[in-house]
Image (tube, grey):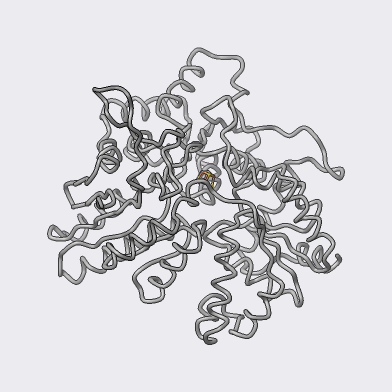
Amino acid sequence: MQAFPSLTIRADALIPRGSFAESQAAFLSPEPALVSRLGSWLSAHSVGIVAHFYMDPELQGVLAACDRRHVHISDSLLMADSAVAMAEAGLRAIVVLGVDFMAENVRAMLDVAGHAGVPVYRVAAEPIGCSLAEAARSPAYQAYLAKAAATPRSLHVIYINTSLDVKARAHATVPTITCTSSNVVRTVLQAFAQVPDIHVWFGPDTYMGQNLAELFRGVGALDDTLARGLHPAHTAQTLRSALERFHHFEQGSCVVHHMFGEQVVARVERDYSDSFVTAHFEVPGEMFRLALAAERVGRGVVGSTSNILEFINERVRDRAKNRTGGTLRFILGTEAGMITSIVRGVQRTLAETSATDLEAEIVFPVASEAVARTDDPELGIVPGVAGGEGCTTAGGCATCPFMKMNSLDALFDLFAEFDRGASDLARFHPRLYAERFKDRSIAELGGEPILHMRSLGRSGVLSDPLVQQVLLR
Ligand code: SF4
């Protein structure tokens, strides 16, 4: 069986293995003319771009080469912070490269920070969806929330990957706080530590909910030291008790992370046992268990895109300091678009430490079936299965079809609309929710769970108003 594609990163070179990696690598050295065109336009119009790590590699290659004053690439939590910082630095408009809930979050946080006059644009006039965000609109999710609402002392922890109106309606039904993959453990365990007998209802990501339960169960069966490592106020016993009141939704998943299934894991275990294993919290249980076991012995990480990036950079830095050289191999258990930021980070570390004899190989666990045969004798095969998304249930293509709606062409098309003074640029704005709910606007009500998350991030505890709402139920 063929090896998974991979990209080996050296201080001054990239070595792709397999056609998938070749296509990822090709865009890491963008055309200077494109970089200059993008940078000049942003500067001339005083516009900033906040982009998610999962952007198309061609687009991300150009973005990453631009001036950081105008372009910031990060996870979804930092995208809104960066947009606010750009507005405060005087930029006059923000383009969001991501999916629609990200643009809505950026809009909500700019409004809260007093920058309602700074317009936000997406690069598509049509919706840019997300399978997780859609799951939270389903009747099954409404039933899940109704059950939470009927249970005393309930707190709904909603994943940030949901639209603003869903957050608003949920918050009107059950007290709700937003979380991201980097703060979900802290959020759930803080709720259990702070409010006696609380019930926590997590959603809509089913794998993340199952992985959290498995994490708490595993640590709860072990010792207090591990429990305190998750949250200082917890012991093994309190985790076991919390599990009885921890609920998760059963019908929501990310179409990309869903692909890191049993067959991929079996191949990683068989052929890549010497590798570090990284996995996003949204992966199925098999991949989660593999990465968690690796994390416990310092050979892996489970968490957010930022956690994965930090882990790879730290391992490379540690090895560079030891001056032992060689190859560090990492399984990339998340969307392949991360590669641009990983390459930048690793090459920076290798340059700073003058580690010319050290390299990092990033392995994409892509199914060999993620190509389709064509009738064209010239082409033979093309990337992607016949179904169209380039993914198979045998293992992932690991690229998000929604994120990939943000192309370089779409970005330049948006700029062209600006330049010709189009009167209908409003079609690129994040969706505006005119309706009111329980006498409050959707923006106000849907922004509140995000503000509760921000308050927790600043103070380390759930805010008093949120706790009061939970206790009054
Ligand atoms: S990778 Fe795509 S489908 Fe998955 S959560 Fe992100 S935006 Fe949604």
Residue 72 visible within the image = no
Residue 441 visible within the image = yes
Left or right of 6? Residue 186 is right
- Horizontal and vertical percent position of residue 424: 61, 17
Most foreground residue, 84 or 211: 211
Q: Spot the residue most to the top.
A: 420
- Horizontal and vertical percent position of residue 326: 16, 64
Residue drawn at point x = 34 percent, y = 70 percent: 299
Location of residue 154 (image quadrant): bottom right
In this rendering, the answer to whether 239 lies above or below 368 is below
Left or right of 202? Residue 351 is left
- Horizontal and vertical percent position of residue 402: 51, 37
Most foreground residue, 282 or 90: 282
In this rendering, the answer to whether 339 lies above or below 156 is above
Residue drawn at point x = 65 percent, y = 60 percent: 455
Location of residue 426 (image quadrant): top right
Residue drawn at point x = 28 percent, y = 51 percent: 4
Left or right of 237? Residue 338 is left
